[in-house]
Image (cartoon, helix red, strand yellow):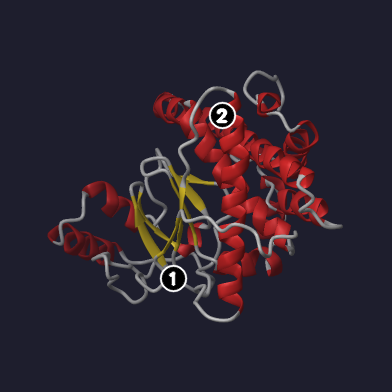
Amino acid sequence: MRWRGRRESDNVEDRRGQGSGRFSQRGGLRLPIGRGRGRGKPSLMFLIVGGVVLWLMGVSPTEILSIMLGGGGSVATQQSSFPQTEAVPSGKTGGASDDLTRFVKVVLAETEDVWGKIFQQAGQRYPEPRLVLFSDQVRSACGSASSAVGPFYCPGDQKIYIDLGFYRQLKTRFEAPGDFAQAYVIAHEVGHHVQNLTGVLPEFNRKRRAMSKREENKMSIRVELQADCFAGVWAHYTGQKGLLEAGDLEEALNAATQIGDDALQRRAQGYVVPESFNHGTSAQRKKWFAIGYDSGKAGRCDTFSVANP
C-alpha cells in the first residue's frame, strides 16, 4: 500500500506503557489468567480474593466479571472481531514500531476520508472514531481487556483498541502477512463503528439478550460479515486513489480467509464445530469483503436480508 507521505489522523491515542505490570497506571489489576499455552487455570480461592481486592479498589461488578473472564470486556457491547491470541509482546515505541504507528494513523485517516464522503453524500455527518494503541491491557467503556483479546471496537466510547503486537501474530501465527492485511484489520473495526452509527450494533446488542447462544452466534456472523463488506468498500475507494500495490488485494483476502471460524478451529483443534461459529467461515468473510470491494457501495453490504450470507 502506498501510504508514505499521506495525511495522518489526529484521532489516535497512544496509551502504550500504561498497562504494563500487575497494576496499571489507571488503577486496574491484571490477574494472571491469560489464555497462553502452559498457563494453568486459577484456583477458585484466587478468583474470590482477586475479586474482593478489585471491589475494594472501586471496580464495578461488571468490570470484575470481565477481568475474571480474561479481560474480554463487556460481553454485551464489545465487538472483538479477530481471533483471541496468546498475550502478545507489546508494540513499543522506537524504530519499526514508530513506522507502524504512522502507518496506522494514515490508514485511519483514509477511512475518515472515505466514510466522511459517503455520509456526506447521504446528507449526514460522520463522527470519526478514535483509535487507541495500548500494550498489555487497557480499560474502555466496555470494561477491561488484555492484548490477548485482539483488536476490538467499543460502541460505548466509539473507540477502536489495538495492541500493535497483534500484527506480528497476524503474520506468523495466522499466516496473513502484508501491510494491506494490517489495513484490513483497522478497516473492519471502523466498519463496526459505521454499524454503531447506523443503529446495527445497538439493535444487535438489544436483541441478543433474549437470544439463545445459537441464535446469537448466527446474528453475530451477519454483523461481522457486514463489517468485512464495509472494509471492502473502503478498499474500493483506496484503490481508486491509486494507493494499492500489486498483491495488496490478495493480502486482504488472505487475511479474511485465515481468520474464518473454520480455519481458526481447524488450526487450533483439528476439526470444526459449525454451531459455535460467530464470525463467519473463511469463504463467507472473503466473499463479503469482495462484494464491498467490487461494488464500492455500502448498500450492497446488507447481510441481514439474505437467507444464507
Residue situated in front as seen by the camera: 150 or 210: 150
Q: Is residue 21 left or right of residue 263?
A: left
Which residue: 60% across, 26% down?
121
Residue 17 figure quarter: bottom left
Circle 1 sits on which residue? 40
Q: Position of residue 203 (x, y in %)?
A: 45, 25
Q: Mark 2: which secondary structure?
A: helix
Q: Amino acid at mark 2?
A: Gln
Disc 2 from disc 1: Cα separation = 52 Å
Rate crowding at label 1 as few (under 14), some (14 to 19) or many (20 or more) other CA atoms within 10 Å.
few
Placement of 102 over or under 122, stated as above or below: below
Asked whether the viewer can see residue 221, the reply is no
For discs 2 and 1, the disc positioned in front in the rendered view: 2
Location of the N terminus (image quadrant): bottom right
Placement of 215 over or under 232, stated as above or below: above
Residue 275 figure quarter: top right
Q: Please, which residue is most extreme toward the left here?
A: 56
Location of the C terminus (image quadrant): top right
Name which of mark 2 and mark 1 comes first in the sequence.
Answer: 1
Circle 2 sits on which residue? 120
Residue situated in front as seen by the camera: 270 or 147: 147
Q: Mark 1: which secondary structure?
A: loop
Q: Position of residue 165 (x, y in %)?
A: 56, 69
Residue situated in front as seen by the camera: 76 or 188: 188
Asked whether the viewer can see residue 34, the reply is yes
Which residue: 49% across, 64% down?
35
Which residue: 46% across, 53% down?
11
